[in-house]
Image: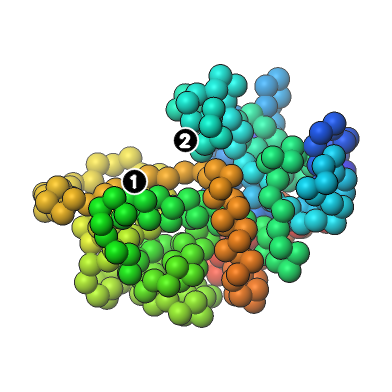
Amino acid sequence: MRAAEVVPGRPDASRVVDREVAERPGELLVEGLLAGVCGTDVEIVRDGFGTVPPGRDAIVPFHESLGRVLSSPTPDFAPGDLVAGVVRRPDPEPCPACAVGAWDFCRNGRYTERGIKELDGYGLQRWTVPPRYAIRLDPALGDAGVLTEPASVVAKAWTRAAAEAGRSHVPVRTALVTGAGPIGLLAALLGVQRGLSVHVVDRVADGPKPDLVTALGARYHTDLDRVPGDVDVAIECTGHPPLVWDCVRRASVTVLAGLSGEHDPVPLDPSVFDGIVMGNRVVVGTVNAGLPDYLEAAEALSRASRPWLDGLITRRVPLDRFAEALDREPDDVKVVVDLT
């Protein structure tokens, strides 16, 4: 079997290797079909983010997965089932969160993550996974099943938003999504599926993004000032500090789902701070996802328009040239590595 392999912080060391993957007792054996590429993968390869498995100097990348079951130790899965693998694993202690299966809220940082932290990812032609960390997908999804992991991230964001809005007695009718990358577009999808009036803001004026938003029945803007009035919920997907403050200023509940990557201080407008206090506004962060979020994501994708989902996958790169997937092109939305 062939596998991608990278050394964090050394792009020149990226390569394809032969890797034997044998069946493991109690685990599914899966044929890898696609691996999705996201900014985290770029940070691993180019910036040295992440941690290789113990005793190794390289890691198999990619945490967004789609595969087909070859064999299963449990009747819950059958050969031919489409599956996606969960990314995070609980820490060994476990902490109070991991002890109840909420590993996405791990409190001591000793969790592991496939393709990111101490575990090989899904960038290989065969992989194994324990059944509890596999999500069976609607077979009609086809290649769009590779969107399960990013959809799980926004499913968690919407769950957190709904919980905080409920505590604040906010009837959620309107939503603002900043950023029209895969996370932002999937956040918009889930917002529309909830029956909300959704506004998406992104600086790109042409290409596939405006059409994808419009096809959802949401409204696309290149200027936040064109979004009318305040909103009930904002899902901030860019990490761009000025947009973060704009979301906090305008939304009753803001969920931060994007990392800034910036280190220069950004002045805080006192009116934003005062608005948080006087308006009982809520700001929460979210990262990764738990098993309920994956299941909700799989259900949301199964209800979505298949042509719309297919429109998110804008570029496919063969495994032998997987490093090309890390170079962003102007019209990219979701780039995938074809493992077959």
Residue wearing tag 1: 284
Question: Horizontal and vertical percent for residue 243?
Answer: 30, 58
Location of the C terminus (image quadrant): bottom right
- Name the element at disc 1: strand
Circle nearer the N terminus (1, 2) = 2
Q: How dense is the environment of label 2, judged by Cα within 10 Å: few (below 14), some, or many (20 and up)?
A: some
Image position of 23 with respect to 95: above or below: below
Location of the N terminus (image quadrant): top right
Residue at the image position 61 percent from the left and 61 percent from the top? 299
Question: Horizontal and vertical percent for residue 272?
Answer: 16, 52
Q: Which mark is residue 304?
A: none
- Name the element at disc 2: helix
144, 77: nearer the viewer: 77
Asked which quadrant contains residue 329, the reply is bottom right
Image position of 172 with respect to 2: above or below: below
Instruction: Inspect the image, locate mark 2, and give the three-letter code of the amino acid beneath it.
Output: Phe
232, 122: nearer the viewer: 232
Residue at the image position 48 percent from the left and 50 percent from the top? 156
Confirm whether residue 9 shows in the render.
no
Q: Disc 1, disc 2: CB below 8 Å? A: no
In the displayed structure image, the side of residue 244 where residue 104 appears, left or right: right
Instruction: Inspect the image, locate mark 1, and give the three-letter code of the amino acid beneath it.
Output: Val
In the displayed structure image, the side of residue 74 where residue 153 appears, left or right: left
Q: CA distance from mark 1 to mark 2?
A: 13 Å
In the displayed structure image, the side of residue 287 where residue 173 appears, left or right: left
Residue wearing tag 2: 105
